[in-house]
Image: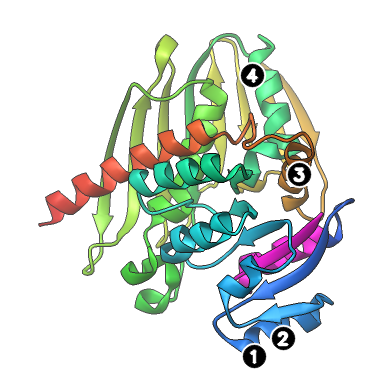
Amino acid sequence: MKFGIMGPGRISRKFADAVLRTEGAKLVGVASKSTERAKKFAEEFAIKNYYNSYEDLAKSDVDVIYIGTTNNAHYENMIVSIENGKHVLCEKPFTLSYEQTKDIFERARQHGVFVMEAMWSIFLPATLKAKEIAQSGKIGQIKQIDSCINYNNQGGDNDRMFNKELGGGVLYDLGVYNLWLSCFFAESYPEVVKGVAELDSNGVDITDVLAARFKGGITASMRCGGTYFGNGKLTIYGTKGCVIMNRPFQDSHLIRVEVGDIVEEYRFEHPNGFVYELNEVIRCIKEGKQQSDIASWERSLKVAEITTNLLNEWASEGN
């Protein structure tokens, strides 16, 4: 299957490396607004074609387009890809609003293409093992999910994560991991979500704390921040014990299961976690599916709805 990349940035490098490690996948094109950047990236990964126009890539003979541009560009990049009949794998956050996300899936349905948000973490062996254990009854009934994802970024206003024009904010970049995995482990969507945030002088959220309640009495506490160091763990608490995904939980290589005095550990080794979501994309497209059962359109829409509501609330409070 032939893949093309929009946006030759840091995250796209990891994706390109994953394609090289994935059976049945081949990189054949890359596009950037800068010809020099596109050419350099193409040379680094032995990609035959490079373009200084995203539309030119969309009109090429690639089968799937991976979108690794800045957050504010995802929506328009997906539109040009879909309207040219290309399947799409787009980095999180999928778009900057619920309405944009809804529109993308409607366009995908009309054009008969596969589209998926690149929430790679839910395909990882460690994540799947944690869910298997939590559902097995070993830790009893699940009662609470606690997660923390933080980075102490030193870029200040020059950091993309804090740039409002580029779709910055830790809820978009980090909090989506908290939300996606909490929903994944709870096997439902929150009935209630509350949140507070620290906003910088430009109105960008730089520290967030969320609390959610799911059906069946499961609650979740979710913390994300871009200005301090956190423990980076995700813990699923049950009535008999707990499952701990070690730091960083979004790419955990170590799981601990604690039931009373008994502790079990499971270790996972892989050079690039993006391979697992790539396998899912290829499988779904070969089977003629327009969406993944795991990273479904419904999941993306639910998370987009939550983030949109929270950000609107915080913006209103900031004024």
Label 4 secondary element:
helix
Residue 243 horizontal/vertical position (percent): 63, 26
Task: Tell me what residue is drawn at x 26 percent, y 55 percent.
Answer: 198
The Cα–Cα distance between marks 3 and 2, rounded to whole angstroms, is: 27 Å
Compared across the picture, whether 123 is left or right of 68 comes to right
Give the label, 1 or 3, closer to the camera. Answer: 1
Please state which amino acid type lies under the numbered disc 1.
Answer: Glu
Ranked by sequence position, the earlier of labels 1 and 4 is 1
Residue 125 horizontal/vertical position (percent): 76, 36
Q: Report crowding for label 1: few under 14, some 14 to 19, many 20 or more residues within 10 A (C-alpha).
A: few
Ranked by sequence position, the earlier of labels 3 and 2 is 2
Work out whether 166 lies above or below 141. below
Asked whether the viewer can see residue 137, the reply is yes
Magenta-drawn segment:
1-19
In this figure, which residue is indicated by the disc labeled 3? 276
In this figure, which residue is indicated by the disc labeled 1? 36
Residue 28 belongs to the span the image colors magenta: no
Label 3 secondary element:
helix
Residue 11 belongs to the span the image colors magenta: yes
- Residue 40's disc is 2
Q: Quadrant of the C terminus?
A: bottom left
Ranked by sequence position, the earlier of labels 1 and 3 is 1
Check whether the beta carbons of the residues at disc 1 and disc 2 lie within 8 A of each other. yes
